[in-house]
Image: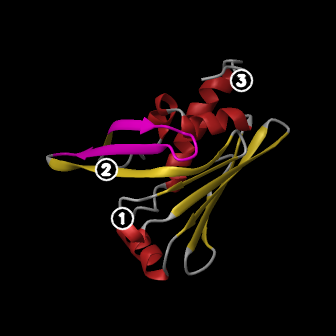
Amino acid sequence: MKNPTTVERKSDRELVATRTFDAPRRIVFDAWTKAELFKRWWVPKSCPIVLLACDMDARVGGKYRLVFGHGDSPPMEVFGRYLEVTPPARLSWTNEEAGDGGAVTTITFEENDGRTLLVMHDLYPSKEALDEAIASGSTSGTGETFEQLHEVLGMFTERGTSTHRF
């Protein structure tokens, strides 16, 4: 793997994932804020769930909603609202499906020579909430999803369409 993903627990309440992508940051930012792109990479292929619906209103105060299916189980929703949307540099949102136990996720996109350093910071309301997220496995697919994002971004940069707006 050319650009590995690192995931580190930085404190009792913080989990930070970092990866460099071989694409301009505005394309990487679009992949996080445009539903038609997000749907292509978010669910780890090794995970037995499918993304049934993806709604994103990426503006401050706007909401997002993801609906996942898993066999005959009832669909599961993940949702929240955007706290900060500063294209193409910064994005922050709540994770409200866990009630008061949800994290606030903040991503920064830093471009250098056409490559983007992405830092994803999850801040949980308590040590117990982060411990529970880790124990449930909800944080374990980051490396795989970032690899899938890498593949999607490669489709645009390899075709010479890096100037394309989504």
Mark-to-mark CA distance, 3 and 1:
37 Å
The magenta stretch spans residue 57: yes
- Answer few, some or many: residues within 10 Å of disc 3's Cα (few below 14, many 20 plus, some between 14 and 19): some
**SS type, badge 2:** strand
| Up/down of 70 relative to 135, above or below | above
User: In this image, 70 relative to 165: left or right?
Assistant: left
**SS type, badge 3:** loop
The one nearer the camera, 82 or 48, is: 82
| Up/down of 92 relative to 7, above or below | above
**SS type, badge 1:** loop
The magenta stretch spans residue 42: no
Query: At label 1, which amino acid type do we have?
Result: Ala
User: In this image, 81 relative to 151: left or right?
Assistant: left
Label 2, on which residue? 77
- Answer few, some or many: residues within 10 Å of disc 2's Cα (few below 14, many 20 plus, some between 14 and 19): some
Q: Are marks 3 and 1 in contact (CB under 8 Å)?
A: no
Residue shown at the point (74%, 43%) measured from the top left: 116
Q: For marks 3 and 1, give the one nearer the viewer.
A: 1
- Give the main secondary structure, helix, strand or loop, of the magenta stretch: strand
Query: At label 3, which amino acid type do we have?
Result: Ser
Q: Which residues are magenta?
A: 52-71
Label 3, on which residue? 162
